Image (cartoon, rainbow, N blue to C red):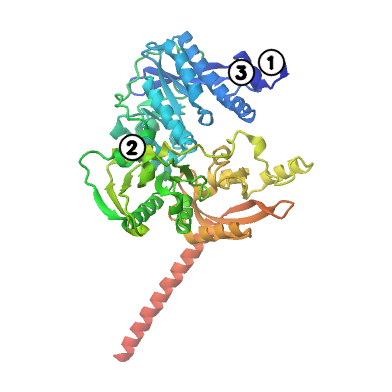
Amino acid sequence: MQQFEGRPVSGVRAVLDDRAVTSVYQPIVELDGGLVVAYEALARGPEGPLHAPDDLFAAARSEGCLTELDQVCRASALRGAVRAGLLAPLTVFVNVEPDALDEEPLAALFDRADRFAGSLRVVLEITERALAARPAELLRTVARVREHGWAVALDDVGSESLSLAFMPLLRPDVVKLDLRLVQERPGPAVAEIMHAVNAYAESSGAVLLAEGIENEQHLATARALGATLGQGWWFGRPGPGITTGRRTGALRLPEPRLLDPPCDRVSPFACLPAGVPVREAPKALLVEVSKQLERQAMRLGVTAVLVTAFQEARHVTPATRLRYRDVVERVGFVAALAEELTEAPVPGLRNADLLPDDPVRDEWDVVVLSPHFSAALLARDLGDDGPESERRFAFALTYERDTVVRAARALLSRVAPRADEPAAPAAAPERSPAPAGAGDPGEGLLRRALAAVGTGITIVDLRLPDQPLVYVNPAFEQLTGYPAAGVLGRNCRFLQLPDTDPTAVGRLRAAIDAGEEVREVLLNRRADGSTWWNECHLTPVTDDDGQVVQYIGIQADVTARVEAERALVAEQERTRRYEAQLARLGAELRVR
């Protein structure tokens, strides 16, 4: 352990103090011509336990210096690119850690990057997790990135369904397809992603880049998905600089769009283009239109974004809260804005407290956005007195996608970072499956026992926001196809589909609210998009005071049983129809 300002420090602090982070660069290739047009910068720590980036960032996260490490890695990537000669017309892709978004360090980074202006073309990679966690910060960051002449890439598209809904909000110049899309067998999920990304690329001119290409079959799949760029060991492994023996060229990106005004300075109603018909209606009608849009968002499911402005927190009534519990269960991202809405009225619902002078305070807005659907109710209060339901609003109902996107961005720019966000999956010490006995002599044995069980086992912590998963065993990973790193910290609703029985989900929720044991059979979705019937048995775990703090879930695949039961019911129904037909024939013969 080294010393830092006279105090003992961890390995991460020593790495930061010594600037011991380096970068390697992996080529990005134009699939048709084989030209190397860009390189992605990948961070590496010093030789030892912190060499791998996952280990390095996990340690930084646990010790509270993630933002500093993120900045050091990006600065190292830019300096290294210049030293290695990765200059224009080549492009350098650099990453931003979602949990490290902070305006001041980004400003410092741009200041340092100014000396590379004209010689270094940069694409900043971000993930949908950054927008879900910190919408306002990320939208401001993307605007500043574009002001500095950098382009934007959306990374790991396809690893999460929500990335499809966030594409038009971020307007990436490059869409990076998650490696599983080219490496795994095609299924419904791949088809859904393929439709969404190709529709976005066609309308925006964005470039599709396939990651994880390691053989000719992967290359063929990448082309079939619509990718024109590729990255993976088939083209070259990460190295210190330019890959020798390969021709280079320029990365062709869509033409820069005119910059929109800052999102937090406009209201959704002000996003309406000139000439759009504006009508008047009482609030009672607008409430019903709002409910219809909410139902549409639920039908769209996990690929949808729903953002609503309620004017004042008092308009979020008990009936609204009950309705939004169902919405949050089914929709990928849901946010509500209102004056004095200082806390999320429903677990999993993002909130924003509007200032009294914010123009959104005088609006009733509902925005729904997904890869293939967009709609917005944008209404401005006319200031009537009298009964609430009879107050009049000037409003427009629009399905024009650019307008809906601008309205969604205007609302999301006001949503604050998620409070008490569960640590990222890399922070393993916070994910102990032992509810109260962490550190007990038997904890290691318990972990090994849970890992050895052939049935899927999960643990949910009720004390954390949105009741996230804090443990899944290997059997659960095999059963669902989701790796632990992709599900820890998330509410398990991601397993549900629009066709999942809402009544069964409601019984589960009621039992959890009451702290009771419950067993239900639910239709769930695997990572590859296939469906299965999950017999879910939930058992409460209490602390020393008798309060329910966690739930242990046992997941069993009963698809064969359910299908057999349904086949039996269908056969019985068919037999009854035949018997009825025979009875009618017999009666007719007796009459004759």
Label 1 neighbourhood size at 10 Å, few (<14), some (14-19), many (20+)?
Answer: few
Foreground: disc 1 or disc 3: 1
Q: Residue at x 45, y 72 (%)?
A: 572
Q: CA distance from mark 1 to mark 3?
A: 13 Å
Q: Is residue 476 left or right of residue 378?
A: right
Q: Quick one: label 3 or label 2, which is nearer the N terminus?
A: 3
Secondary structure of the residue carrying numbered label 2: helix
**What is the quadrant of the N terminus in the image?**
top right
Q: Position of residue 151 (x, y in %)?
A: 38, 23
**What is the quadrant of the C terminus in the image?**
bottom left
Secondary structure of the residue carrying numbered label 3: helix
Q: Are marks 1 and 2 in contact (CB under 8 Å)?
A: no
Q: CA distance from mark 1 to mark 2?
A: 48 Å
The residue where tag 3 is placed is 16
The residue where tag 1 is placed is 5
Q: Position of residue 358 (x, y in %)?
A: 39, 39
